[in-house]
Image (tube, helix red, strand yellow):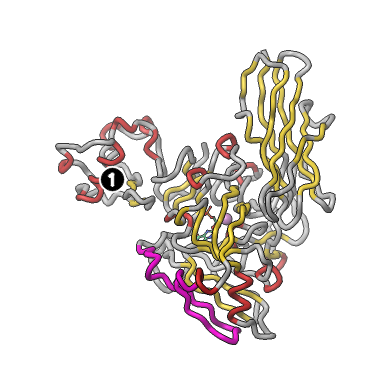
């Protein structure tokens, strides 16, 4: 596995010299999902409680442990994140973790299996009783809303919404693009409960010169510089007013997990995940295209025209990514299936940013011929769509199953996409291996 961009690399036990094992820089978890890094001192009560919780019993000599200690009983599974299951950690500072495709098989993504993408350090205090959301800028009635106000003043709805990081698939770019090396798993479709962003903006009353929203969260910049935000993205008013964007306070019927933006976040489906500000504290309405952190330069922007792999592109030639492209995932079987059955069921999901997926085809002959699958409608707009098919292999041998989604405007997943400097928008077809004996 490639682990780029890592200030504090995660290493398996074998890679760490015996002498160093008690002192490795490795995240500890304080029990509610937050990750703390070793400061190489003794462990302290909170750290010891976390290790005891992980081990499942008290540790009589615990006071002798160093911070960052990994109990041997936890062997390789030390990269666990409280409330998460089976995620692969790409980076621990900031924390970024993706979900293997076969663990995304559920029609609705359980919170335990929703990827995590952090640009900074999550806030410590996420007390929902005290949280305030400010709506200001070019509005008639600037507002300061508690979560109780949100629930009382606006209609509360639940929607299944797909959220994909624009960098999903970056790992497959050649030459490599810097950044988290997401493979396939920076996508999820959970049920989110909240109020419509459009209702809140209408309540505030947009002024005629409003053209863009700007979002601010409560997470801290990695540098520790309090005057900087790790990320602050925004939306053109037209997209902001789409009635499917939520200011959400629940995921899958429970309070939002600390890593997903507790107690309140935006969920803006169909556009880069970065538009869905977590730990949301402020929505600021502006008369210019928002120029906050990661809105400018090469962040979440791609060259206007296709460029050659590795080509240097002037910043002026980049445009902001809007709708995500059509894409699909095979979530069953798990890749590298060994089977004696000639006929197997394959299935997964497909989504298309602001559009709808019209067909999903599979191939077992490296794309020479394609077969249509049964494709469900989304359960609500902006939910991913589930699909399934039986495929029959003619002989024993090594096969690949490829999936290819086509959207309602006729755009289809490609075999290969044009390279871009930051490795965004990789929507190439998904393929899994099947060995038939
Ligand atoms: N405040 C804040 N919001 C944020 C981020 C962040 O780092 N800080 N990351 C963004 C990015 S790039 C993505 S892809 C999504 C990921 O949401 P998730 O971690 O709940 O999956 O959150 C977005 N919202
Ligand atoms: Mo992202």
Residue shown at the point (41%, 70%) measured from the top left: 131
Residue shown at the point (54%, 81%) measured from the top left: 136
Q: In the image, is residue 134 part of the stretch drawn in magenta? A: yes
Q: In the image, is residue 114 part of the stretch drawn in magenta? A: no
The residue pinned by badge 1 equals 50
Taking the image as shown, residue 313 lies to the left or right of residue 4, namely right
Q: Secondary structure at mark 1?
A: helix
Q: What x and y, as percent, mark residue 100?
A: 55, 37
Residue shown at the point (50%, 53%) measured from the top left: 253
Q: What x and y, as percent, mark residue 137?
A: 56, 83
Q: What x and y, as percent, mark residue 66?
A: 22, 44
Residues 205 and 322: in front is: 205
Q: What x and y, as percent, mark residue 187?
A: 60, 48
Q: Which residues make up the magenta segment?
A: 125-149
Q: Residues within 10 Å of mark 1 (few under 14, many from 20)?
A: some
- Quarter of the image with the C terminus is top right
């Amino acid at each position: 596995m490639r682990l780029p961009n890592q200030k504090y690399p995660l290493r398996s036990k074998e890679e760490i010299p015996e002498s160093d094992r008690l002192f490795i820089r490795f995240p500890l978890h304080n029990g509610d999902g937050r990750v703390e890094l070793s400061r190489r001192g003794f462990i302290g009560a909170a750290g010891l409680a976390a290790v005891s919780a992980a081990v499942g019993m008290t540790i009589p000599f615990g006071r002798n442990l160093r911070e960052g200690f990994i109990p041997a009983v936890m062997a390789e599974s030390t990269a666990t994140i409280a409330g998460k299951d089976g995620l692969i950690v790409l980076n621990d500072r900031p924390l970024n973790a993706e979900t293997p495709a076969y663990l995304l098989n559920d029609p609705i993504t359980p919170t335990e299996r929703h990827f995590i993408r952090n640009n900074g350090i999550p806030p410590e205090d996420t007390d929902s009783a005290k949280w305030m959301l400010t709506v200001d800028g070019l509005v008639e009635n600037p507002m300061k809303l508690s979560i109780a106000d949100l629930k009382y003043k606006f209609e509360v709805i639940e929607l299944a919404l797909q959220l994909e990081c624009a960098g999903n698939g970056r790992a497959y770019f050649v030459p490599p693009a810097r950044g988290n090396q997401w493979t396939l798993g920076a996508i999820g479709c959970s049920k989110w409960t909240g109020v419509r962003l459009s209702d809140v903006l209408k309540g505030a009353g947009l002024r005629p010169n409003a053209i863009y929203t700007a979002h601010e969260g409560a997470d801290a910049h990695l540098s520790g510089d309090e005057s900087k935000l790790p990320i602050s993205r925004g939306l053109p008013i037209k997209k902001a007013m789409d009635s499917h964007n939520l200011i959400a306070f629940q995921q899958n019927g429970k309070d939002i997990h600390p890593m997903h933006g507790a107690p309140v976040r935006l969920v803006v489906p169909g556009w880069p995940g970065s538009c869905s500000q977590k730990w949301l504290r402020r929505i600021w309405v502006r008369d210019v295209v928002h120029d906050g952190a990661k809105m400018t330069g090469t962040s979440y922007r791609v060259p206007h025209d296709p460029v050659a792999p590795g080509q240097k592109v002037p910043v002026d030639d980049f445009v902001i990514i809007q709708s995500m492209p059509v894409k699909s995932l095979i979530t069953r079987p798990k890749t590298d299936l060994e089977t004696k059955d000639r006929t197997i069921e394959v299935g997964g999901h497909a989504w298309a940013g602001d559009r709808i997926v019209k067909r999903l085809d599979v191939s077992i002959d490296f794309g020479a011929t394609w077969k249509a699958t049964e494709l469900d409608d989304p359960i609500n707009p902006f939910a991913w769509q589930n699909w399934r098919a039986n495929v029959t292999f003619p002989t024993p041998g090594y096969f690949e199953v490829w999936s290819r989604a086509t959207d309602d405007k006729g755009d289809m997943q490609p075999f290969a996409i044009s390279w871009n400097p930051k490795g965004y928008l990789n929507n190439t077809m998904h393929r899994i291996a099947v060995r038939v004996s």
